[in-house]
Image (cartoon, grey):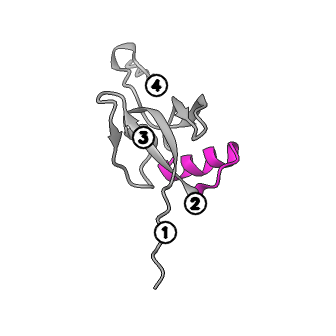
Amino acid sequence: NCKVEHTDQNPGDVKENVLPGTMDLLVFLPNGAEITVKVNESKAAMDLLIDLCSQYHLNPTHHTLELQSKETHKPLGFKPNTAVGVLEIDKVFIKQKVIEEKPRR
């Protein structure tokens, strides 16, 4: 008799940011407010922007996300469809886009 047990997590094998799960992010809003949100790690970065903007009455076309690395505390480059769980981030800044005026001729 061979009994095989499947456990979702062995205490010695627990990895941070295993998809799908949730993670806590510290979000900095354009008005300076700081909030902590729990997000699904498989959520795409652009979806996170849209969700946060709708939640805090911001227009997503006028805002952008700056995702800060846990390790370097510097902004990370990312693609809009990248899952936030793979980015190793803990801080998100919602920044107002700088709209450049086009010179009129």
Whether the magenta-drawn stretch holds residue 26 is answered as no
Residue 72 in the image, given as x and y percentages of width and height: 29, 30
Numbered badge on residue 61: 2
Q: CA distance from mark 1 to mark 3?
A: 26 Å
- Whether residues under marks 2 and 3 lie with C-beta atoms below 8 angstroms apart, the answer is no
Say what amino acid the circle numbered 2 marks: Thr
Of the 4 image quadrants, the one containing the N terminus is top left
Do labels 2 and 4 touch, CB within 8 Å? no
Question: Which-is-in-front pick, marks 1 and 4?
Answer: 1
In front: label 3 or label 4: 3
Q: Main secondary structure of the magenta part?
A: helix
Q: Nearer the viewer, residue 16 or 102?
A: 102
Q: Which residue is mark 1?
A: 101
Q: Tell me if residue 89 comes above or below residue 51 in the rendering.
A: above
Identify residue type, mark 3. Leu
How packed mark 1 is, by other alpha carbons closer than 10 Å (few <14, some 14-19, many 20 or more), is few
Q: Residues within 10 Å of mark 4 (few under 14, many from 20)?
A: few
Q: CA distance from mark 1 to mark 4?
A: 54 Å
